[in-house]
Amino acid sequence: MESVWRQKIKLYFTNIWFLWVLCLIFNIITFLFILIKISPGEQTLALRYNVLAGVEWYGKGKNLYFIPGVGLVITGVNFTLFRALKNNENFLISLTVFASLSVQVVLFISALFLAKVN
């Protein structure tokens, strides 16, 4: 027989709202990582890096804030779709949160790689 705490934790993690909160946490971490680690300003930084060709785009460092901005917009659109489809118990409501979480993870990894280049 499982303990009460284990049941509460299992219920919490199976709840889909935890994944939406996790999306926002990844977005905030990405924003803070860019702010603290890269410290973009008016200087020219690498905005896009390709392993084969090297740096492809240079630009103002403040343009790096588009990375968490795009993630926030995608999460907002998916959350709106989630709320619209909430009454339907189908696969699409789960797909919205997993797509948002995947985008947030990929954008965070891209910020990590750009920090190494810059």
Image (tube, rainbow, N blue to C red):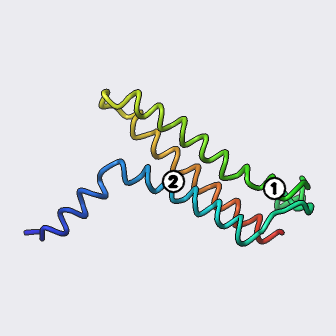
Query: Is 114 located above or below residue 102 in the figure?
Result: below
Q: Which mark is residue 6?
A: none
Quarter of the C terminus within the rendering = bottom right
Asked whether, in this view, residue 19 is left or right of residue 88, the answer is right
Q: Which mark is residue 24?
A: 2
Query: Is 79 located above or below residue 28 in the figure?
Result: above
Rendered residue at 52%/44% (across/down):
99
Q: Position of residue 41 (x, y in %)?
A: 84, 62
Residue 7 appears in the picture as rendered: yes
Q: Helix, strand, or loop for circle 2? A: helix
For the view shown, which residue lies furthest in the left direction? 1
Asked whether, in this view, residue 3 is left or right of residue 45, the answer is left
Quarter of the N terminus within the rendering = bottom left
- C-alpha separation, residue under disc 2 versus residue under disc 1: 21 Å
Question: Upstream in the sequence, badge 2 or badge 1?
Answer: 2
Asked if the residue under mark 1 is in contact with the one under mark 2, i.e. CB atoms within 8 Å, the reply is: no
Q: Position of residue 30 (x, y in %)?
A: 63, 61
Q: Position of residue 110 (x, y in %)?
A: 70, 59
Q: Position of residue 111 (x, y in %)?
A: 70, 62
Q: Amino acid at mark 1?
A: Lys
Q: Which residue is mark 1?
A: 62
Rendered residue at 51%/59% (across/down):
25
Q: Quadrant of residue 5?
A: bottom left
Nearer-the-camera pick, 34 or 78: 34
